[in-house]
Image (tube, rainbow, N blue to C red):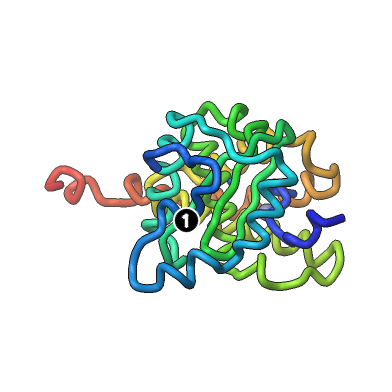
Amino acid sequence: MRLRLFALAIVLSCYGCAAPRAGERGAFLSGSDHLYRNYAGLAEAARLESACGGCSADAAAQCRLEETVQRVAAVSRQQGTFDFRILRSTAANAYSLPGPRIYLTQGLYERLERDDLLAAAVAHEIAHLEAGDSRRQRRGPQDGLEREIEADRRAAELLAAAGLAPKAMLDLLAEIREELRAADYEERCARLSFEAQLMQPAQRARPPAAIAAA
Ligand SMILES: [Zn+2]
């Protein structure tokens, strides 16, 4: 299975403003290390895009995805300028690759009408990027599950830091429940429920006086 090479981000059991044009890679990249970021993960990106039917040209969706990526990336440890695309595949899935690159399939994007659910999907992928998961080979199913659970936990943390409710991560798991294997779903929800209860969105955590002064 070639997709297994991406060792990623199998949808939460696994997610601008110009629409990408055919053959235009790295359109959102800039900066002194442009060349490095442009080519890191490029071969994997090409294989993924090919396997998923290419990238969507939906400019509105690309804009919404950009706003979400920027909001979550602003509170993450991940360095670099993000490249992000929507793949034409109808299967609900998301991927992260070195670059950093984030992909959501059309099948997943269309299910995420709520902005906080989209943010949760993006946060989960950014958590994988922070952990370097796409560069590390999985050491079996349990290792894969532990990475997903850690990405869920970190995603909830990123949502809170971005002023969003961490519970959105749980809602996302429920939304894509049928995409997850039963054991994964139950264990991930059980582990995330505890974490999410401890976290509060940054806005709500601020004292009333600080909010009034803002
Ligand atoms: Zn994942």
Amino acid under disc 1: Gly
Where 138 falls versus 12 (above or below)? Answer: below
Where 146 falls versus 21 (above or below)? Answer: below
Q: Nearer the viewer, residue 197 or 178?
A: 178
Q: In the image, what residue occupies the spot 74% across and 63% down? A: 146
Disc 1, SS: loop
Judge left or right: residue 34 versus residue 198.
left
Q: Position of residue 76 (x, y in %)?
A: 44, 61
Dividing the image into four equal quarters, which quarter contains ligand 1?
Answer: bottom right
Q: In the image, what residue occupies the spot 55% across and 49% down? A: 197
Q: Nearer the viewer, residue 210 or 37?
A: 37
- Please give the residue where the numbered disc 1 appears in the rendered image: 26
For mark 1, does the 10 Å Cα neighbourhood hold few (<14), some (14 to 19), or many (20 or more) residues?
many
The residue positioned farthest toward the front in the image shown? 23
Q: Position of residue 48 (x, y in %)?
A: 69, 51
In the rendered view of the protein, which quadrant contains the N terminus? Answer: bottom right
Observer able to see residue 191: no
Judge left or right: residue 167 versus residue 179.
left
Observer able to see residue 19: yes
Q: Which quadrant of the figure has residue 136?
A: bottom right
Q: Position of residue 22 (x, y in %)?
A: 54, 42
Q: Which quadrant of the figure has residue 211?
A: top left
